[in-house]
């Protein structure tokens, strides 16, 4: 759907408020569709990926690989799918492969891009590309310095139950569960590809 011109906002000036190692914050003055002006404060984010890792457990059984990680801004341990931010110049698939290996130790034989989500459109440029991975092979994790997380497996039914009862509140993981549910029931399809060499 194309954006309607009557809803656009024109930047008049921009002021950088914060220049961090990871995030940058700005305050812009904009002209609104009715000609009036307003301020817009937002965070510039490099973008990220999330992986929905599918683990074949035999006899047609399936589990997903999940993580528990303490998230300082909300002050609690969050259950989520593996994910991570893009490095400069890195493709989203290369990032997905790297993050899955580093955080869980798994590599995948096949990959499929599901889509993209914008988790906080009101105040951030962040996008998260959603990838599915299958044909998993276990290996050694290589966590970043200062990164601590637990890796565990769950059935899709357990995942959906946790989404429903509020155990899972992470937006990207809720979207991953939506994708998984629709792929499993045949409503949505994925275009699988062999994993390129790392």
Image: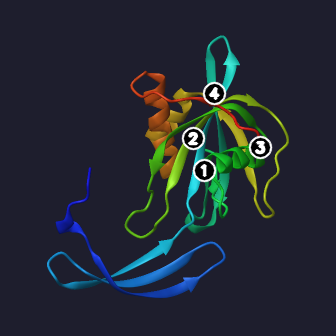
Residue 90 vs residue 184, the one in the foreground: 90
Figure check: 184 above or below 87: above
Dot 1, crowdedness within 10 Å: few (<14), some or many (≥20)?
Answer: many
What residue is disc 4 on? 63
Say if residue 67 shows up in the picture. Answer: yes
Name of the residue lying farthest toward the right: 140
- Side of 12 where 22 appears, left or right: right
Q: Earlier in the sequence, mark 1 or mark 2?
A: 1
- Side of 140 where 128 appears, left or right: left
Dot 2, crowdedness within 10 Å: few (<14), some or many (≥20)?
Answer: many
Q: Earlier in the sequence, mark 3 or mark 2?
A: 2
Dot 3, crowdedness within 10 Å: few (<14), some or many (≥20)?
Answer: few
C-alpha separation, residue under disc 1 versus residue under disc 2: 9 Å
The quarter of the picture where residue 34 lies is bottom left
Check residue 198 in the rendering and tell me which mark sits there, or answer none.
Answer: 3
Q: Quadrant of the C terminus?
A: top right
What residue is disc 2 on? 131
C-alpha separation, residue under disc 2 versus residue under disc 4: 16 Å
The kind of secondary structure element at disc 3 is: loop
Figure check: 84 above or below 175: below
- Frontmost of labels 3 and 2 is 3
Q: Earlier in the sequence, mark 3 or mark 4?
A: 4
């Amino acid at each position: 759907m194309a954006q309607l011109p009557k809803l656009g906002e024109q930047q008049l000036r921009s002021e950088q408020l914060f220049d961090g190692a990871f995030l940058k914050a700005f305050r812009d003055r904009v002209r609104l569709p009715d000609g009036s002006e307003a301020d817009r404060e937002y965070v510039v984010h490099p973008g990220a990926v999330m992986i929905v890792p599918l683990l074949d457990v035999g006899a047609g059984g399936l589990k997903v690989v999940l993580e528990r990680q303490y998230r300082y801004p909300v002050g609690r341990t969050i259950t989520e799918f593996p994910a991570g931010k893009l490095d400069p110049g890195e493709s989203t698939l290369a990032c997905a492969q790297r993050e899955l290996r580093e955080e869980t130790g798994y590599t995948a034989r096949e990959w499929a891009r599901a889509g993209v989500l914008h988790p906080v459109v009101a105040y951030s440029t962040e996008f998260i590309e959603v990838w599915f991975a299958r044909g998993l092979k276990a290996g050694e994790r290589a966590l970043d310095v200062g990164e601590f997380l637990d890796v565990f497996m769950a059935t899709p039914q357990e995942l959906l139950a946790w989404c429903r009862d509020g155990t899972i509140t992470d937006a990207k993981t809720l979207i991953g569960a939506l994708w998984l549910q629709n792929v499993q029931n045949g409503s949505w399809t994925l275009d699988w590809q062999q994993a390129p060499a790392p």
